[in-house]
Image: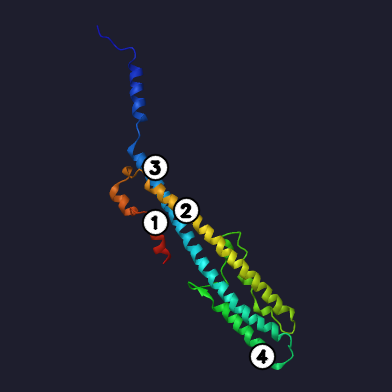
Amino acid sequence: MKITPHNSTSIKENITSKQSSKINPQDKTQDTQETQDSIKINQSEISKTVKDINNAIGALQIAVKKIDEINHDAKDLVKISKKPQEEKNIKKADELKEKIYKILQDSNFNGENVFSKNYQRLSTDIHFDPKSIKVSIVNIQDPNTPQNFIKNLDEQKKYAKEAIDILHNKLSTTMDELKKTDSSYNTLDKSALNQSQFKNAHKPEGITLERITKLLG
């Protein structure tokens, strides 16, 4: 007499269930690779932000220095405007305006004009508006125009200094984010990755502060 286990179907289902519950090594590798790629992309974006902020800070520092130079010449324009009819003053005013215009045009940092940059794209808290500095508004026949020009210079200088502080704070926050991505990268289960492909895809040190410094250099 042949005895057939009454629960054979149940046993098969149990075996199938255990097999399906096993983690597929390929799935684990794919998940780890996707996480690694995501971190690499995030690091790249943060690196670009760090570079942009550093360039902006450098440009703003140049802008503050140049505004001081312009302010000195603008004060001479105020003096001249008190006697606008004198021929020598008319000529002198034109020379000063041309000098100021040249300063605005030739003030560069890393190959970019510091009075043409859009600093507000880095932070909505920045109010520095370099394009508002226009020497063309100065007319010595109207003494209010050189006064208004100086007033705007002082205001923009204040905004530029505030922008430097804002960007320094943002840089600090961004560097903290970079450290976190480095930490996330270092805690990845790299055993799930093909080691030869992993080494070629990404250097073991990740993106560190030292590498950022070299990038900015």
For label 4, the residue is: 91
Mark 2 or 4, nearer chain start: 4
Decide which of tag 1 and tag 4 comes sooner along the chain.
4
Disc 1 or 2, which lies upstream in sequence? 2
* Alpha carbons under labels 2 and 4: distance apart: 55 Å
Relative to 2, say whether 85 is above or below: below
**Mark nearer the viewer, 2 or 4:** 2
Q: Which of pointers 4 and 3 lies earlier in the amino acid sequence?
A: 3
| Circle 3 SS class | helix
Q: Are marks 2 and 4 in contact (CB under 8 Å)?
A: no
The correct choice, above or below, for 20 with respect to 193 in the image is above
- Estimate how packed mark 2 is, as few (under 14), some (14 to 19) or many (20 or more) residues with alpha carbons within 10 Å: few
Q: Amino acid at mark 2?
A: Asp
Tell me the element at label 1.
loop
* 1 vs 3, front mark: 1
Q: Which residue is mark 3?
A: 31
Q: Amino acid at mark 1?
A: Thr
Q: Quadrant of the C terminus?
A: bottom left
Numbered circle sitting on residue 208: 1
Q: Residues within 10 Å of mark 1 (few under 14, many from 20)?
A: some
Q: Is residue 83 above or below residue 152?
A: below
What is the x, y in percent for residue 206? 37, 54
Q: Residue at x 43, y 52 (%)?
A: 179
Instruction: In the rendered structure, find residue 186 and report the number of the disc placed on it.
Output: none
Taking the view exactly as shown, the residue that stands out farthest to the left is 1
Q: Can you identify the residue that label 2 sits on?
A: 176
How far is mark 3 from mark 2, CA to CA? 26 Å
Is residue 46 found left or right of 70 in the rendered image? left
Horizontal and vertical percent position of residue 70: 61, 79
